[in-house]
Every structure is written in C-alpha cells, then in structure tokens.
C-alpha cells in the first residue's frame, strides 16, 4: 500500500514535534523532502491539510517562526 502525503505529513510532524506537540515548520519541511514529498510552497501544502494540521506564527522571533501541530493524536 502506498503512503499518502497526508500520512507522511503526520509522520513528519510527529518526528519534529516538541513535548507540547508543536513542530517548527522549517524542520517539518526538511523531513518531508527527505521522505520524498514534493511541494512548491510549504505553507500552501500545509493549508491543503487544514483538517489535520493547525499552524501558529511566533512574531516575537526575528525572523518570525511558523509552527505546526496535529489537531488529533495520530
């Protein structure tokens, strides 16, 4: 059975997540590429899975850092 991009995204977020469940989106992007997922702009790719993933931006950091976490435990 072929693994879907959604399943790989879930795995990548789980791989990169800290104990609070949030993962740095840049780290998730690296993990996705290493797993063979091809995407144009990572933020647009993530938006396709808004039923699975939520994001937040830490504007206190320069440059701002985007984080992602799963909406449910997978």
Image (cartoon, rainbow, N blue to C red):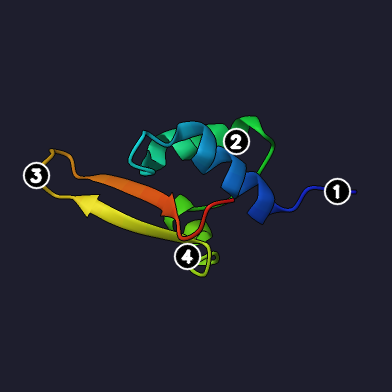
Q: Nearer the viewer, mark 2 or mark 1?
A: 1
Q: Are marks 1 and 3 in contact (CB under 8 Å)?
A: no
Q: Nearer the viewer, mark 3 or mark 2?
A: 3
Q: Which callout, 1 or 4, points at the residue further toward the start of the chain? A: 1
Number of numbered callouts drawn: 4
Location of mark 4 (residue): 47
Q: Are marks 4 and 3 in contact (CB under 8 Å)?
A: no
Can you tell which quarter of the image residue 35 is in? top right
Location of mark 1 (residue): 2
Q: Which callout, 1 or 3, points at the residue further toward the start of the chain? A: 1
Q: How far apart are marks 1 and 3 (CA)?
A: 40 Å
How far across and down, in percent of the image, does residue 34 sit? 62, 29
Q: Can residue 31 be seen in this view?
A: yes
Q: Do the residues labelled 2 and 4 touch (CB within 8 Å)?
A: no
Q: Which callout, 2 or 4, points at the residue further toward the start of the chain? A: 2
Q: Residue 60 has which mark?
A: 3
Q: Nearer the viewer, mark 1 or mark 4?
A: 1
Q: Are marks 3 and 2 in contact (CB under 8 Å)?
A: no
Q: In this view, does 65 lie above or below 27?
A: below
Q: In this view, does 68 lie above or below 29?
A: below
How far across and down, in percent of the image, does residue 73 sit? 53, 52
Q: Name the residue located 13 percent from the left edge and 38 percent from the top edge.
A: 62
Q: Which callout, 3 or 2, points at the residue further toward the start of the chain? A: 2
Q: Distance between the residues labelled 1 and 4?
A: 22 Å
As helix, strand or loop, the secondary structure at mark 1 comes to loop
In the rendered structure, the answer to whether residue 20 lies left or right of residue 16 reads left
Q: Do the residues labelled 1 and 4 touch (CB within 8 Å)?
A: no
Location of mark 2 (residue): 33
Q: Distance between the residues labelled 4 and 3?
A: 23 Å
Q: Distance between the residues labelled 3 and 2?
A: 28 Å
């Amino acid at each position: 059975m072929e693994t879907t991009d959604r399943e790989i995204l879930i795995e990548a977020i789980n791989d990169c997540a800290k104990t609070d469940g949030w993962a740095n989106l840049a780290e998730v992007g690296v993990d996705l590429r290493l797993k063979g997922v091809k995407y144009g702009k990572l933020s647009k790719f993530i938006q396709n899975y808004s039923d699975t993933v939520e994001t937040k931006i830490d504007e206190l950091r320069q440059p701002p850092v985007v984080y992602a976490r799963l909406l449910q435990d997978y």
